[in-house]
Amino acid sequence: MTVRPKSLDFMLFFTVIALLSFGVVMVYSSSAVSAYVNFNDSYYFLKRQIIWVTLGIIAMLLTLNIDYHAWRKLATPTLIVTIILLILVLIPGLGKVVNGARRWLGFGSLYLQPSEIAKLGMVVFCSASLARHQDKITSFMKGLVPQLMILLVVFGLILKEPDLGTALAIGGTIFILLFTAGAKLSHLTSLGLVGIIGIIAAIILEPYRLKRLLAFSNPWADPLDTGYHIIQSLYALGSGGIFGVGLGRSREKFLYLPEPHTDFIFAILGEELGFIGTITVILLFFLFAWRGFKVAIEAPDLYGSMLAAGLTTMIIMQALMNIAVVTASMPVTGIPLPFISFGGSALIFTLTGVGILLNISRYIHDK
């Protein structure tokens, strides 16, 4: 029986709009000082963020009106393109190196981050694959190994950039998808233990990652180097109190806190808007999670359910990781806060995923 599209989940839609609004305001407030110092234009990052938000909303509206089943047919081509781009970014002369990481492709002022495509591509591919082979999911060799082989290729390429945070976000999302699809808990437990061992090895084998881990355990041991980000972030959050010091009145953004408009924008938000501001953003992410997983539960078919669960998990996992880093609950990973941090390809592909999620919401069963 064909399910006719209905109205989209407007609560989910307006939750995203609210988060984007927070983002635009906070990008300007957190970046005005560094923008003026580095570009002699306080609105430098704001103007670019408005462009990215506009392009992202256009992408969201386009995917919102494309039947989500079309992505099932594009799952394999999307994965192939993703892997090719991840390989290209590692080639000297093609991939752009910033702060020691080779993560961008592009020319002039236009750059694309292939790992952002990988997030969306892996969710689309694994959702299609798990839905097609759901009857084999309880078999380790036939159900899990094919997914794990693809994950290891993508995980390894992203780790090579290096970008452990994004690799962990993708790995964690696929793990949740395997659980959602019905994989045995014994298999998942074994995979989880192997994954933890692999992460520990990746940290030990890279000196800068080990330094970040040690700084996380005791940032005050090296307050001017490895512990600097964490300490300044905590200063910002602590200064905010309940109501904050006032919008635009942050002190940490005066070149004290590194990356105040990207990875640590939540710290500036906490300083300026206080506990009230941070809890509001957190509640908006909870609302997004509730509506997203509701769409997954009520989707008309297994593929729609898997796709909605994967898209929701990917976004929420990144939000949790970013907030955990800012609050010194986990080591620094370089994961931006979805919808709020300054960014180009990250914002566009996140909103593309939201558009797909909203399209699925148009086909949910009537209750």
Image (cartoon, helix red, strand yellow):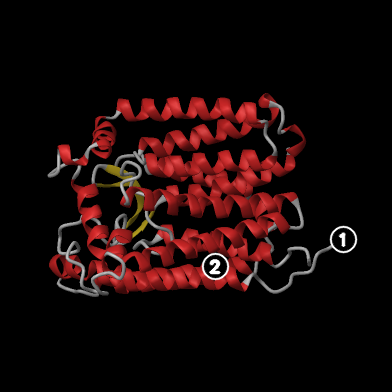
Disc 2 residue type (three-letter) = Met
In this rendered view, identify the residue nearer to me: 63 or 17. 17
Label 1 environment density (alpha carbons within 10 Å; few <14, some 14–19, many ≥20): few
Residue 26 vs 135, above or below: the answer is below
Check if mark 2's residue and mark 1's residue have beta carbons within 8 Å: no
Disc 1 residue type (three-letter) = Met
In the rendering, which numbered label is found on residue 1?
1
Q: Is residue 150 left or right of residue 211?
A: right
Disc 2 element: helix
Q: Is residue 313 left or right of residue 273?
A: right
In the rendering, which numbered label is found on residue 60?
2
**Residue displayed at 63% across by 38% down:** 178
Which residue ends up furthest to the front in the rendered image?
A: 242
In this rendered view, identify the residue nearer to me: 135 or 235. 235
Q: Is residue 112 left or right of residue 147?
A: left
**Residue displayed at 32% across by 69% down:** 26
Disc 1 element: loop
Q: Is residue 308 left or right of residue 1?
A: left
Q: Residue 214 placed where, x, y %?
A: 25, 33
Quadrant assignment, res 61:
bottom right
Q: Residue 265 placed where, x, y %?
A: 31, 61
In this rendered view, identify the residue nearer to me: 127 or 204. 204
Q: Residue 93 placed where, x, y %?
A: 29, 44
- Can I make out residue 94 in this image? no
Q: Residue 205 placed where, x, y %?
A: 31, 25
How far apart are labels 2 and 1 at the CA level?
Answer: 27 Å
Label 2 environment density (alpha carbons within 10 Å; few <14, some 14–19, many ≥20): many
Q: Upstream in the sequence, badge 2 or badge 1?
A: 1
- Can I make out residue 158 in this image? yes
Q: Locate the C terminus by quadrant.
A: bottom right
